């Protein structure tokens, strides 16, 4: 039976004949992404000129060369500038899918000011995603918009109703059975009313139900697709939120004359787990070279008893796939991995691609090293520093391909043993493409593998490594001590494009870094830097037991090297000392885990304090309404006080209303009122507040309580 419009010649059909075929959504997008460019005017498949421009798509890292980073459950907010010639209204969508799937999912975009559009989609599975944008002229919305203006102007609408009905009828031919029937019902109703009841016809045309159906069944034959499929690297939750603890296995002993073992490490696990750490990071566990071995305090004249640096890898006992004989066996190492997992922790392994002079590589593959004019192998240098016990690998050799394959096999070997976290030593001294390939290959074979880049180098180099695939990155946090430095640096890390590809990992100390602040600030300085690291960053780490025992002795004035550094000797730490910070560390790690606001970095906001020695900042988790406010005295020597100003709306509080701040460190509670409140911190008592904010509510029965 003919439809209700069969007797009416369609003006829309006359002006725009129906294309000979309907391109499936996913095929259209793939074709556009491969063939269409915005620089050149291209013909769409219908033979019409491309009218819509899509540009300034974000996030897009270096023109789409690199992926952004997310974990499962996080969202991606996509924005783009979308516009066209003329006055037609447009519609736009973000298309996204797991990279290995072919079916696109769709998130409708919302128009903002000045042709700027936005949409958000969620990451549902732990696999790489791709996304892109498409947009098209929307004749129905344009018609409906113009219809309302014509009505207000008192113009005749009879013919306009028929044009709209044609658009609805055409949409029915694209829709599924259920939507098609509903659309045809709307079209018939408009036609039936178009001459007899203009008001009713207008209400039918402007109904929200019809608008929803039309947007769900658009005409995509004139759609323009952004010519790039942008990528999302998806990691497991430990990539976003975790606490690292670095420990030398050989120092897991009560006797400095006895070398610690993996068995001793297992006995130390309860101590580390008791402080609430998620990851135990071990410096290199491989055999240590004998040739040019360093003595205590980096002496070039070692004694027969000196053990050398774990980073001088390789000896007659083996290389990067071997274990130092005094630590134990491969089975012992596997047992350590299992024991850590049973306590809710993982072991991170050091990936240091460099060799001691007696590494098997030096004997078997001299072509992998740089040979000096006198025939000797070039050792590592960072003038004026010299590392005579380490030979760097030479990636510019003609045999670079074989070298890179061997190094990739090292990472794969330890992943096969069960290691899923690697801290990579000095990655900025190796070629960028090498890391990009290694990380991609290991993650493809061992999903969920985390790579932490230890690259204290220039910012652009650090950012490049993060873009190439490193899951997390060391930062300049150790040297950012003033309020201005901290505010500027962490605003850059959390509120600019950098956050899309770099996940910061904050370390107040490392075996190589004992900052001047820690050397001269005493115990309060360690507490201050710990509180900052644990709350500014969702990921942080400490080198212990040196940190919790407040080890502050430097090798010499002006040096950041530890006196009697563990890099060159065994340190038998007394972890039971009563002045240890271990209880505070455990408390703050519990605070971190109990408060979802501290599980991410992007909500970090700094707040004004009228004292440059006080810094205040908050983090918010909207899903749980969890709000954490941290206030820290940056002066380790003197009591400081000031007035903190809070953005009440941002923190979910109402101005001029009471609210409670609960200090999660001390357990104290304070009743604050309004946006401006007083704080006072004595570093000799406790130099920081970590407040959980609770709204103050007064019920109709005058019973006060806090949410």
Image: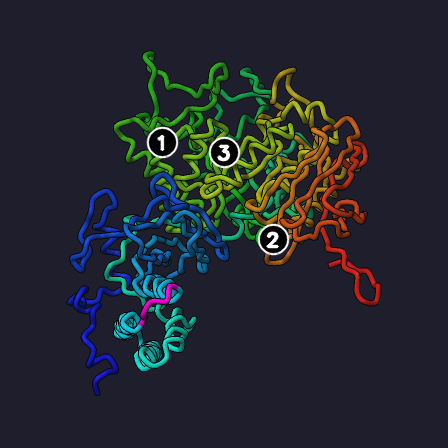
Q: Which mark is residue 454?
A: 3
Q: Quadrant of residue 162?
A: bottom left
Q: Position of residue 304 (x, y in %)?
A: 57, 21
Q: Position of residue 581 (x, y in %)?
A: 73, 38
Q: Is residue 190 above or below residue 436?
A: below
Q: Residue at x 61, y 42 (%)?
A: 605
Q: Residue at 23%, 62% (x, y): give it.
A: 221
- The range drawn in magenta is 153-157
**In the foreground, 506 or 608:** 608
The mark nearer the N terminus, 1 or 2, is 1
Q: Residue furthest bottom?
A: 1
Secondary element at image label 3: strand
Q: Mark 3 and mark 2 in contact (Cβ < 8 Å)?
A: no
Position of 127 with respect to 481 (left or right) is left
Task: Return the x and y of residue 42 as percentages of the image width and height.
Answer: 19, 49
Choose top left, top right, bottom left or bottom right for residue 395.
top left
> Mainly helix, strand or loop, the magenta region?
loop
Q: Label 2, on which residue?
A: 621
Q: Which mark is residue 431?
A: 1
Q: Dot 3, how many residues are within 10 Å of its Cα: few (below 14), some (14-19), or many (20+)? A: some
Residue 527 visible, this orientation? no
Q: Nearer the viewer, residue 142 or 678?
A: 142
Q: Earlier in the sequence, mark 3 or mark 1?
A: 1
In this rendering, which labeled residue sits more in front, label 1 or label 2?
2
In the image, 447 versus 11, the foreground residue is: 11
């Amino acid at each position: 039976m003919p439809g209700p419009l069969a007797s009416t010649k369609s003006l829309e059909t006359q002006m725009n004949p129906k294309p000979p075929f309907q391109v499936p959504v996913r095929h259209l997008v793939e074709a556009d992404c491969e063939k269409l460019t915005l620089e050149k005017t291209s013909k769409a498949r219908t033979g019409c000129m491309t009218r819509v421009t899509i540009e300034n798509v974000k996030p897009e890292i270096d023109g789409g060369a690199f992926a952004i980073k997310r974990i499962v459950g996080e969202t991606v907010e996509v924005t783009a500038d979308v516009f066209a010639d003329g006055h037609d209204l447009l519609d736009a969508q973000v298309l996204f899918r797991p990279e290995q799937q072919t079916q696109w999912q769709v998130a409708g975009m919302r128009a903002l000011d000045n042709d700027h559009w936005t949409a958000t989609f969620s990451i549902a599975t732990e696999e790489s995603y791709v996304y892109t944008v498409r947009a098209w002229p929307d004749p129905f919305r344009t018609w409906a918009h113009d219809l309302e203006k014509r009505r207000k102007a008192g113009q005749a609408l009879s013919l306009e109703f028929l044009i709209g009905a044609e658009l609805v009828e055409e949409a029915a031919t694209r829709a599924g059975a259920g939507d098609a029937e509903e659309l045809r019902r709307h079209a018939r109703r408009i036609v039936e009313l178009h001459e007899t009841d203009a008001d009713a016809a207008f209400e039918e045309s402007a109904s929200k139900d019809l608008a929803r159906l039309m947007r769900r069944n658009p005409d995509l034959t004139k759609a323009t697709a952004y010519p790039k499929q942008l990528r999302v690297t998806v990691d497991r939750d430990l990539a976003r939120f975790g606490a690292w603890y670095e420990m030398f296995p050989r120092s897991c002993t009560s006797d400095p004359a006895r070398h610690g073992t993996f068995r001793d490490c297992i006995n130390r696990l309860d101590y580390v787990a008791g402080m609430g750490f998620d990851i135990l990071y071990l410096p290199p566990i491989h055999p240590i070279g004998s040739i040019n071995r360093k003595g205590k305090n980096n002496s070039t004249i070692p004694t027969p008893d000196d053990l050398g640096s774990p980073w001088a890898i390789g000896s007659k006992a083996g290389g990067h796939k071997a274990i130092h004989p005094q630590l134990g066996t491969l089975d012992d190492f596997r047992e350590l991995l299992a024991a850590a997992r049973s306590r809710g922790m993982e072991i991170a392994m050091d990936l240091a691609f460099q060799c001691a002079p007696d590494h098997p590589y030096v004997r078997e593959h001299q072509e992998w090293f740089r040979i000096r004019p006198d025939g000797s192998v070039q050792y590592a240098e960072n003038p004026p520093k010299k590392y005579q016990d380490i030979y760097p690998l030479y990636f510019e050799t003609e045999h670079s391909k074989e070298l890179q394959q061997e190094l990739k096999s090292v990472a794969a070997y330890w992943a096969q043993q069960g290691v899923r976290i690697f801290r990579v030593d000095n990655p900025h001294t190796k070629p960028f493409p090498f890391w990009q390939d290694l990380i991609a290959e290991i993650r493809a074979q061992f999903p969920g593998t985390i790579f932490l880049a230890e690259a204290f180098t220039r910012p652009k180099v650090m950012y490049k490594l993060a873009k190439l695939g490193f899951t997390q990155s060391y930062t300049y946090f150790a040297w950012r001590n003033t309020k201005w430095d901290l505010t500027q640096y962490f605003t850059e890390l959390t509120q600019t494009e950098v956050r899309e590809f770099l996940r910061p990992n904050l370390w107040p100390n490392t075996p190589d870094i004992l900052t001047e602040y820690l050397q001269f600030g005493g115990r309060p300085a360690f507490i201050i830097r710990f509180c900052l690291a644990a709350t500014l960053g969702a990921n942080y780490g400490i080198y212990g037991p040196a940190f919790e025992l407040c080890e502050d002795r430097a090798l010499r004035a002006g040096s950041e090297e530890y006196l009697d550094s563990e890099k060159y000797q065994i340190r038998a730490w007394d972890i039971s000392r009563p002045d240890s910070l271990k209880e505070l560390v455990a408390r703050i790690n519990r605070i971190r885990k109990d408060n979802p606001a501290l599980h991410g970095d992007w909500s970090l906001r700094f707040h004004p304090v009228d004292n440059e020695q006080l810094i205040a900042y908050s983090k918010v988790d909207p899903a749980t309404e969890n709000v954490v406010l941290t206030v820290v005295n940056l002066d380790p020597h003197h009591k400081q006080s000031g007035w903190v100003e809070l953005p009440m709306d941002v923190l979910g509080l109402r101005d001029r209303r009471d609210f409670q701040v609960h200090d999660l460190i001390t357990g104290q509670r304070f009743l604050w009122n309004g946006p401006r409140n007083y704080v006072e911190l004595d570093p000799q008592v406790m130099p920081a507040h970590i407040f959980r904010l609770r709204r103050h509510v007064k019920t109709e029965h005058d019973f006060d309580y806090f949410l």
